[in-house]
Image (spheres, rainbow, N blue to C red):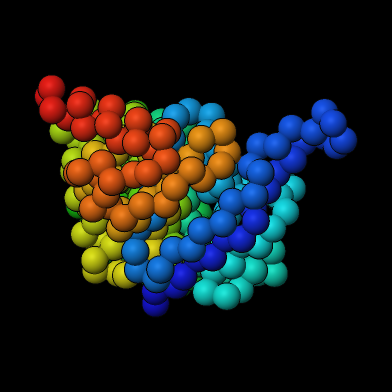
Amino acid sequence: MTVSIDIKDLSIIFGSGPTAAKVLPGLSFSVEPGTCFGLVGESGSGKSTVLRCIAMLTEFWKGEIRIDGQSVRDMEVITRCRTLQMVFQDPYGSLHPRQSVRTVLSEPLRIHRLGDREDRMQAALTDVGLPIDFLDRYPHQLSGGQRQRVAIARALILEPSVLLLDEPTSALDVSVQAEILNLLARLQAERGFTYIMVTHDLAVVDHMCDRFAVMLNGEITEILPRTAIAGNQATHPYARELIGASLEYEGHH
């Protein structure tokens, strides 16, 4: 089932009064069902914080975050986990070194009391293009790309509607990055996932996203369709600069 995401006036403010620090000063954007929305900007622009708010990993935000009209704050934890899953940047950090792939994949099934565990685990590995015998491997026996495939399989195993992707390829070699992006694009086409993808790489946006927001200091400067990249059709100076730098870089490579 494809779902929409609507975010209205999302803000995080630390402290109060004149010394208050706004991390996110009030963002609004929506994501159409079954599309991929990119959040682009330099490190520290607040991109990952937005994902953490949507996933309720950070709870002290104000504003509205709705998945298919339902507020994430009103969802039971179990429902929220079944609806949205996050894939983190670092496949080393997100998998426990002493847990086999079998343990990594079976844990969400156990927590959510889902049956047919063996079948579900095998299907999840097959979905991400890994052999079934990888169930008995440990993270140190896998390459970076294989680890990220396991992390994606873990996110898929509860059959969510939304995947929050936090720079899912930036820790990987360039050749492996393309494999993982193609995998994510194929899964989206097959399952109708709604994606929000955080990245600093406009080539990733060009490959994956229908629309994207350019962020600067926690604010969205501009929301653009993917087609705006090629001819740099941004109007905001910072967005123009970011796209221009990326096009120049691509041109030299």
Q: What quarter of the picture does the C terminus occupy?
A: top left
Q: Is residue 38 left or right of residue 204?
A: right
- Which residue shows up at 39% across the image and 64% down it? 194
179 to 76, vertically: above or below:
above
Q: Is residue 45 left or right of residue 90?
A: right
Q: Is residue 181 left or right of residue 110?
A: left
The quarter of the displayed image where residue 1 is located: bottom left
Q: Position of residue 220 (x, y in %)?
A: 51, 45
Q: Is residue 18 visible?
A: yes
Q: Position of residue 118 (x, y in %)?
A: 35, 63
Nearest the viewer among 163 and 209 is 209
157 to 151, vertically: above or below:
below
- Which residue shows up at 44% across the image and 72% down it? 3
Q: Position of residue 87 (x, y in %)?
A: 43, 47
Residue extending farthest to the top is: 252
Q: Is residue 143 left or right of residue 34?
A: left
